[in-house]
Image (cartoon, grey):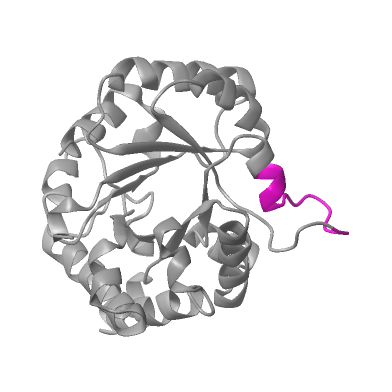
């Protein structure tokens, strides 16, 4: 498979926004903006309480439904948590794992990221696994080491046959919600490093097929340049995913 044959994936992360009623309307508005666009996969990752409403809104469309987190156990005394099987039965196909906000605010570790990713994969979900360095780590010149380590640990004990359901999202922590963005070349370089980690662990063919997104403040203005880079196969979109017109511009930029 040639590098350019990888299908791009644009995933919106709504974070803690939208009630079920407003989520349903937003999903419908997004569909109206992008219907007929089949050149990339489109996912919207919504809060747990919005899943049933959005599942209804996107039923029969090209839009796929995602969640923003998943617990690593199948069931048990884990008050407030949601399992992979619960998500799957609600129509979820994708789930974000290890977002920097989960790591920063809720004590997520490389170990729990790995456990959550494996739980998602074992249930047949596609895991969007987030990795990325903080500003001081970039300034210290250890971006490659940080991102490589996170990727290796996230994929610990994940067999090659499950890689078709793995997406790695490079999200430099310093660029999330700040308006700052890595340059096209910076983003492409780190996505290439991630691909090299996959090659070392699973082989060159697996690396060529791996979908690697960029997730640091991609928006309507910078999407075209980022998505044109060799190693960037889509985006994990934050604020712009709440604006149907802006999200549509990004989807248009990802058409192949």
**Residue 129 inside the magenta-drawn segment:** no
Report whether 233 appears left or right of 18.
left
Q: What residue appears at the point 37 percent right and 54 percent down from the top-left corner? A: 176
Image quadrant holding the C terminus, namely top left
Q: Position of residue 165 (x, y in %)?
A: 45, 56
Q: What residue appears at the point 13 percent right and 54 percent down from the top-left corner? A: 4
Report whether 89 appears left or right of 140.
right
| Magenta range | 76-87
Q: Position of residue 241 (x, y in %)?
A: 38, 34
Q: Is residue 12 above or below residue 71?
A: above
Quarter-of-image position of residue 190: bottom left
Q: Position of residue 133 (x, y in %)?
A: 36, 72
Image quadrant holding the N terminus, namely bottom left
Q: Is residue 82 above or below residue 197?
A: above
Residue 50 seen from this side? no
What's the magenta bit mostly, secondary-structure-wise?
loop
Q: Is residue 148 above or below residue 233?
A: below
Report whether 43 appears left or right of 67.
left
Q: What residue appears at the point 51 percent right and 22 percent down from the top-left corner? A: 59
Residue 62 seen from this side? yes
Along the line of sight, the residue nearer the viewer: 1 or 56:
1
Q: Position of residue 216 (x, y in %)?
A: 32, 54
**Residue 85 inside the magenta-drawn segment:** yes
């Amino acid at each position: 498979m040639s590098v350019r044959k990888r299908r791009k994936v644009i995933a919106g992360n709504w974070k803690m926004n939208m009630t079920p009623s407003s989520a349903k309307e937003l999903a419908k508005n997004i569909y109206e903006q992008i219907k007929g666009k089949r050149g990339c996969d489109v996912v919207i990752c919504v809060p747990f309480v919005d899943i049933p409403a959005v599942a209804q809104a996107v039923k029969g469309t090209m839009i796929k439904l995602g969640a923003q987190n998943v617990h690593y156990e199948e069931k048990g005394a884990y008050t407030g948590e949601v399992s992979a099987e619960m998500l799957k039965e609600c129509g979820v196909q994708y789930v974000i794992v290890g977002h920097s906000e989960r790591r920063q605010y809720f004590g997520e570790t490389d170990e729990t990221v790995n456990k959550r990713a494996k739980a998602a994969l074992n249930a047949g979900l596609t895991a969007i696994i987030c990795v990325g360095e903080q500003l001081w780590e970039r300034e210290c010149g250890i971006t490659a080491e940080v991102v490589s380590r996170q990727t290796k640990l996230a994929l610990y004990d994940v067999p090659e046959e499950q890689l078709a359901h793995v997406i790695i999202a490079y999200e430099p922590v310093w660029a999330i919600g700040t308006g700052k963005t890595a340059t096209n070349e910076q983003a492409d370089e780190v996505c290439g490093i991630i691909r090299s980690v996959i090659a070392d662990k699973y082989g060159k063919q697996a690396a060529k097929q791996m979908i690697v997104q960029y997730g640091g403040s991609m928006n309507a203005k910078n999407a075209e340049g980022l998505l044109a880079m060799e190693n960037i196969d889509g985006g994990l979109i934050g604020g712009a995913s709440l604006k149907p017109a802006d999200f549509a511009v990004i989807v248009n930029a990802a058409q192949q």
